[in-house]
């Protein structure tokens, strides 16, 4: 029974880490772009950050991509993010 608890606690830590990273991204977008995005609209795959959004926000992201990436890196996210889509 303890083995199952240990396994579940490891997965819980992984899930918590992912949700913290998403929270950081949401806060950075809100601070730089003055636009609120939902945590559910943020996802990571390999070295890319994906944001589900409309064309207006996509344009704003492209314009401010460098400042967004720098600020996300400053916030201490362990993932290496090279691009935002």
Image (cartoon, rainbow, N blue to C red):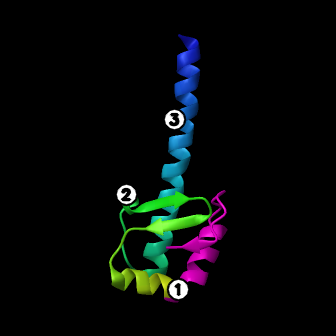
In the rendered image of this protein, does residue 32 appear above or below residue 74?
below
How crowded is the residue under tag 3: few (<14 C-alpha within 10 Å), some, or many (20+)? few
| Residue 53: quarter of image | bottom left
Looking at the image, tell me whether mark 2 or mark 3 is earlier in sequence order: 3
Residue 64 numbered tag: 1
The residue tagged 2 is 40
In space, the residues marked 2 and 1 are separated at their CA atoms by: 21 Å
Left or right of 82 on screen, residue 58: left
How crowded is the residue under tag 1: few (<14 C-alpha within 10 Å), some, or many (20+)? some
Q: Are marks 2 and 1 in contact (CB under 8 Å)?
A: no
Q: What percent of the width, then of the height, locates residue 65?
A: 55, 82
In the rendered image of this protein, does residue 33 appear above or below residue 48?
below
| Residue 78: quarter of image | bottom right
Per the rendered image, the range of residues in magenta is 63-85
Point 65% across, 61% down: residue: 76
Point 57% across, 13% down: residue: 2
How crowded is the residue under tag 2: few (<14 C-alpha within 10 Å), some, or many (20+)? few
Point 42% across, 86% down: residue: 59
Residue furthest to the top in view is: 1
Residue furthest to the left in view is: 54
């Amino acid at each position: 029974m303890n083995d199952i608890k240990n396994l579940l606690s490891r997965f819980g830590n992984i899930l918590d880490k992912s949700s913290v990273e998403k929270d950081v991204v949401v806060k950075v977008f809100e601070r730089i772009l003055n636009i609120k995005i939902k945590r559910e609209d943020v996802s990571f795959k390999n070295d890319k950050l994906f944001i589900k959004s409309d064309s207006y926000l996509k344009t704003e992201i492209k314009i401010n991509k460098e400042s967004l990436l720098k600020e996300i890196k400053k916030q201490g996210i362990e993932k290496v993010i090279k691009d935002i889509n």
